[in-house]
Image (cartoon, rainbow, N blue to C red):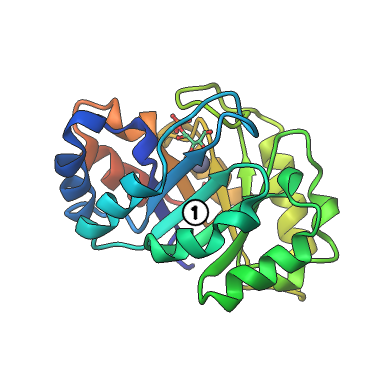
Amino acid sequence: SKKHLIAPSVLAADFAKLYDDIIMVNNSEADWFHIDIMDGVFVPNISFGFPVMQAIAKHATKPLDVHLMIVDPDRYLQLCKDSGAAVITVHYEACTHLHRTLAAIKELGCKAGVALNPHTPVSLLEDVIADLDLVCLMSVNPGFGGQKFIQNTYNKVKQLRAMAAGVNDGLLIEIDGGVGVGNAGALLQAGADVLVAGSSVFAAANPTQSIADLKAVDIQ
Ligand code: DX5
Ligand code: ZN
């Protein structure tokens, strides 16, 4: 079976020693850097913006998986790409013309992702599923790290995997929020491919080991 990907979320890093945390992720078994960009409008919080992302990109040796929690993401796609993004994920709830936005992301040469808030049904992606590289299922309400995992996410992973079967078998299903070794196996079993982990990595006594532990999880 194909191995899942681990994407540590830099949101949970110590911003005063960001360089050290980037090197830690570089030297770990992590696959991607998960970069959470917030605007204080789409979500009730502000994280960091593209100048900080550019500083991360300068040192990161793994792809940057950018999660745009912003309204009107079309305005920032070019800058996001120029700041080092490999994957650009926009929110379904923030895109009036999602099909056009996805085409614009691909036009830039990035992988295109859509994130769904916990209340947004996966069935709404039916008419764009063939165009997607990744779907990010939010397993918490976006805006903050360290929140409790929402159990209904398992149903959404299974539904999405079934929807993608035969239409987009290479679709990556990413889970974002409250992920750790306690639920990783069940998420992989349900059909997840990419696990985002913020606090379960950076709040751990040994972040490198917690990344290795997540990578070593087998389908239950
Ligand atoms: C939440 C962000 C997440 C967050 C995950 O809005 O999208 O990526 O950093 O943090 P944990 O793993 O602590 O829930
Ligand atoms: Zn995220």
Which amino acid type is shown beneath numbered disc 1?
Val
Who is closer to the viewer here, 179 or 70?
70
**Image quadrant in which you'd find residue 150:** top right
Up/down of 211 relative to 17, above or below: below
Residue 105 position within the rendered picture, expressed as x and y whole percent measured from the top left: 59, 68
Residue that numbered label 1 is attached to: 194
As drawn, is 8 to the left or to the right of 153? left
Q: Is residue 213 visible?
A: yes
Q: Secondary structure at mark 1?
A: strand
Who is closer to the viewer here, 127 or 204?
127
Up/down of 19 relative to 170, above or below: above
**Image quadrant in which you'd find residue 100:** bottom right
Residue 81 position within the rendered picture, expressed as x and y whole percent measured from the top left: 45, 65
Q: Is residue 135 visible?
A: no
Up/down of 109 relative to 74, above or below: below
Q: Residue at x 22, y 40 (%)?
A: 209
Q: Residue at x 43, y 51 (%)?
A: 218
Who is closer to the viewer here, 81 or 215?
81
Badge 1: few (under 14), some or many (20 or more) residues near its Cα, within 10 Å?
many
Across the whole image, how many numbered discs are drawn on residues? 1
Q: Residue at x 55, y 61 (%)?
A: 77
Who is closer to the viewer here, 166 or 31?
31
Q: Residue at x 55, y 35 (%)?
A: 39
